Amino acid sequence: MGSVKLAEPKVEVVVPGGAELGESPVWDERHACLWWVDIKRGVVHRDDAADTPPARQPAHAPLQLGEEVGAVALRERGGLVLAVRSGVLLVDDLTAPPRRLADLAAPGVRFNDAKCDPAGRLWAGTLADDGRAGGGRLYRVQPDGRAQVALGGVTVSNGLDWSPDGRTLYYVDSATQRIDAIAFDPQSGTLGHRRPLIEIPAEEGIPDGLTVDAEGFIWLALFGGGAVLRIAPDGARERTVRVPVSHPTSCAFGGPDLTDLYVTSAAKDLSAEQRRRQPAAGAVLRLRPGVRGRPASCFAG
């Protein structure tokens, strides 16, 4: 019996194009909304109603931080945790100034992607502004604000998420053109053996943000490749979904039943002509691939 070819899911624009470097989507089940950031503009966005027409104006004003913001994550007690250029901030209320949890500023270095593990620790990575090899780190930030370097010598710390059993961290250093699988101790948060899982040919794009679905498969955005891949836990490619932007950056499951896959994107590095031909560049996209995601883990601090 031959394999069944899955229908290509419809891709919708749910937040119009315009982000310079959209990133870090996370679904907030408590408020039925999607949070995401525009890194270069230092803005955190909240979009409440993904089922309304894309021309709708957001109900909430963006949170302007005055510095680059690499990622947003949820907190168990409500509010947000942010990885910004100068370190880690806590947001209790969008009307109140953020509070500093950890000062991790380093000259010529900014935070990029970040995510919380199931135990409530924040994992946040950096990269050097000049792109120098080994100029970044991956930090493990404890709920009390103590931060340790979990991985050094990173060039472009990017997508990360955990297997459903919590014993494998899937991690992207974009400069390596691959996803690595790293043994993970859920209790202590320590890393073990690291091995390459899948390598992406450079002509297909740069591996960027990722998420793991309820079946343990990895969804990976290909920056410059105009696609999102679904990858099996053994590294085999299961599916390629084309999107109407050349620079998808990350993805996250959301919606009331976690069957919507949201994809952020960027207009960064596109010429005026390329932007004209890609009106969705910098948009948030949505597709329904026929699988379910998992609730986002929250920061325990």
Image: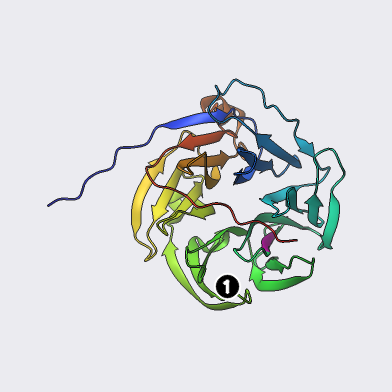
The picture places residue 88, in percent across and down from the top left corner, at 78, 57
Residue 58, picture quadrant: top right
SS class of the residue under badge 1? loop
| Residue sitting nearer the eye, 42 or 232 | 232
Q: Main secondary structure of the magenta part?
A: strand
| Residue sitting nearer the eye, 43 or 146 | 146
Position of residue 266 relative to residue 297, above or below, is above
Give the residue displayed 63% in from the left and 77% down from the top. 188
Position of residue 43 relative to residue 162, above or below, is above
The picture places residue 114, in percent across and down from the top left corner, at 65, 57
Residue 96, picture quadrant: top right
Residue annotated with mark 1: 186
Give the residue displayed 46% in from the left and 70% down from the top. 196
Furthest residue to the left? 1
The reply to whether the magenta stretch includes residue 58 is: no
Position of residue 298 relative to residue 265, above or below, is below
Q: Which residues are magenta?
A: 122-126
Give the residue displayed 64% in from the left and 33% down from the top. 47
Give the residue displayed 60% in from the left and 38% down from the top. 32
Q: Could you tell whether 276 is left or right of 58 in the image?
A: left
Q: In what quadrant of the picture does the C terminus appear?
A: bottom right
Question: Callout 1 environment at 10 Å: few (<14), some (14 to 19), or many (20+)?
Answer: some
Residue type for callout 1: Pro
The picture places residue 228, in percent across and down from the top left corner, at 45, 46
Position of residue 119 relative to residue 115, above or below, is below
